[in-house]
Image: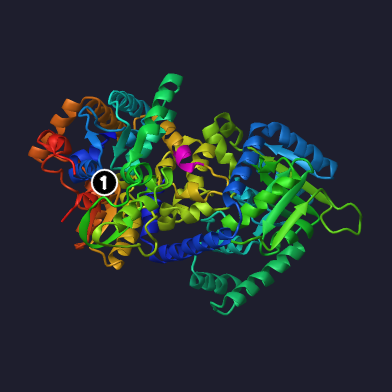
Amino acid sequence: MTFDRDARTALADAQLRGALRHATTLFGERRRAAIADVPDWEGARDRARAIKDETLLHLDQYLEQFAANAERAGARVHWARDAAQACDIIAGIAEQRGARTVVKSKSMASEEIRLNAALAARGIAAVETDLGEYIIQLAGEEPSHIVVPAIHKTKGQIAALFAEKLGMEPSDDVTRLAAAARQALRRRFAEADLGVSGVNFAVAETGTILILENEGNARLTTSLPRTHVALMGIEKVIPRFADLEVFLRLLPRSGTGQALTAYQSLLTGTKRQPGDEGPEELHIVLLDNGRSRMLTSPVTRQTLACIRCGACLNACPVYRQIGGHAYGSVYPGPIGAVLTPQLLGMGESSALPYASSLCGACRDVCPVKIDIPAVLLHLRAQAVARSGGPGTHRLLERLAFWAYAAVMVRPRLFEWVMRCARTLHILPPLGAWTKWRDLRPLAPRSFREEWRRGLRHEAGR
Amino acid sequence: MRVSLFATCLADQLWPAAAAGAVRVLRRVGCDVQFDERQTCCGQPAFNTGYRPEACALARRLIEIFESSGADAIVSPSGSCTAMLHHYEQLFEDAGWRARARGLAERTHELSAFLVNRLGVEDVGASFAGRLTWHDACHGLRDLRIKDEPRRLLRHVRGAELVELPPPGAETCCGFGGTFSVKYPEISVAILDEKVDAIERAGVDAVVSGDASCLMQIGGRLSRRGSAVRALHLAEVLASTT
């Protein structure tokens, strides 16, 4: 994991930081405006969280109920233990149908399992059809935001990219850029044999999946090709159809500051009659990939309540400065910092729980009230407990905290140490601080000395 | 009202004027203030870095110290360390210790919240000539929900003019974050610079906050940038009568 190095690279990129500052401010303002007129926003957050908590406590039952109802409606449900298995299932379906081209609407789960690469390895071309994802794919990059994958790109950069890859006249007119993408994508839709989508919510009692989007590309992806594969993390299930009400109120407002997205597709099974719209086959892939491990403790379990709105990214001061790529994971920002180490294991990503000032802005904007700072602290404790290894840095840190605790439980020793530091001008090696900030010197006299020297008896009033 | 001061190790050693200011302000509004010299650190640096056994040992000590004080309230010139005491319960498995931690949390207040909400005082008789802006320290703001209290107190300071910080505003983090500030100093300072830019745009004489930690971070950068703006603790301003 190279978080430290990649963060520094990002900090040196003025264009990136300008784009991030602009976009995160804008999304933050839009969100605030969108929730201002919602009666009982807090109550909606509490209800949504209660629904998620209830579901996660009995996740096995709700998943089985969902699978049974989806199959009754004509879908085929697949269970994938991990990324490799999920890729295998989807590539297998594509191969059976002889699909050469796959169109995809936005799906973070598909990014998580690196589906495009897995399909490419088997000679199948996957085309992203969400505009942001399409930009990223053309650029050969990875998304840097859960909802706004190309948030790190400026209009000028996109214009240059389209001129190069789509052969259009260079233009930074957004309408013309979008039209060029639409034209290129329509051709791909027409030739695609299979559509892969994500899922925002899956309703257990009906077997319905809900997909939210703004560009109509998800609707085309799920209705035009003869086969539709929907990929969803197992945490996407909710018990009842009526539960959608509260989530639909929360998600678009938190994510993009919209009262509702332009499209909401509710899909239940396949088409019933030959003349109906929709695919002939619907496959739903339920992805675990580390999620069921998070169910074991209440602190980690709440990570699975996430509805992927991205509000915590926009609110995070760290994300605002460095963007998404430095996190080295498809899930960046505060939610990524807690999700990634739990999905991938702490070994590779033990830096991420520390990539936060613990300011709590993420917790305040989270529509399902995930206490992200509490999860970060939990993971930090795990990182410390696990690291028996030879890392010199950790060893020094351990020693420092051992010494700190040994001194702090002995007030006389504490005072003696501080007095020595004061008179001998000994300071800890704080180059990381003093390179950019002046260090406030120790006060000539500590408070406790002042207290003893007279403050104790100073008259009030 | 008998108050036991929770000075915090940071104020004790680096910002004694904050702790002394808190003592004077509390006495001025009629409190009997005591300070138990056995107190050191609340354990937050260890807790926030993942060293829970170390944090737990310090939590036990502080619970015992403040239980023995017999005070009606424990008051601290720090939102962050007050919030840490409010988190103590989760450090313990044992029901007895959890109850004791809860008992301590119920009696522990941050200075501005104690003055305004508990004592109903907004004018502490302070005077301070200058244009001021307030920085909301994150843990006071988001863990303890302290927002209006310090502003009300500052508005009653004679001679002081309080202005809100321009964007990104008073509520955004200063980038300190404890060990975060030295683990990722470049990110910490990038966050800080947006804050310091806003402070300089505000055209103030001083930035005031309720936590010595944020003030070290903000003040350290202001000083490095050669700014004339001072970083002051709320208790210093409230104790001032000149």
**Quadrant occupied by the C terminus of chain A:** top left
Report the residue marked by disc 1: B212
Residue B113 pos. (x, y %): 36, 45
Q: Position of residue A294 (x, y in %)?
A: 56, 34
Residue found at x 16% / y 26%: A412
Q: For numbered disc 1, what is the local secondary structure?
A: helix
Relative to A125, does residue B203 appear above or below in the rendering? below
Along the line of sight, the residue nearer the viewer: A54 or A357: A54
| Dominant secondary structure of the residues highlighted in magenta in the image | helix
Q: Nearer the viewer, residue B28 or A432?
A: B28
Q: Residue furthest left?
A: A423
Does residue B144 appear to the left or right of A87 in the view shown? left
**Magenta region, residue range:** A371-376
What residue lies at 56% left-to-right and 78% top-to-bottom? A173
Residue A57 percent location from the top left of the image = 64, 32
Q: Residue A349: which quarter of the image?
A: top left
Is residue A319 found left or right of A172 in the rendered image? Answer: left
Q: Closer to the camera, A4 or A29?
A: A29
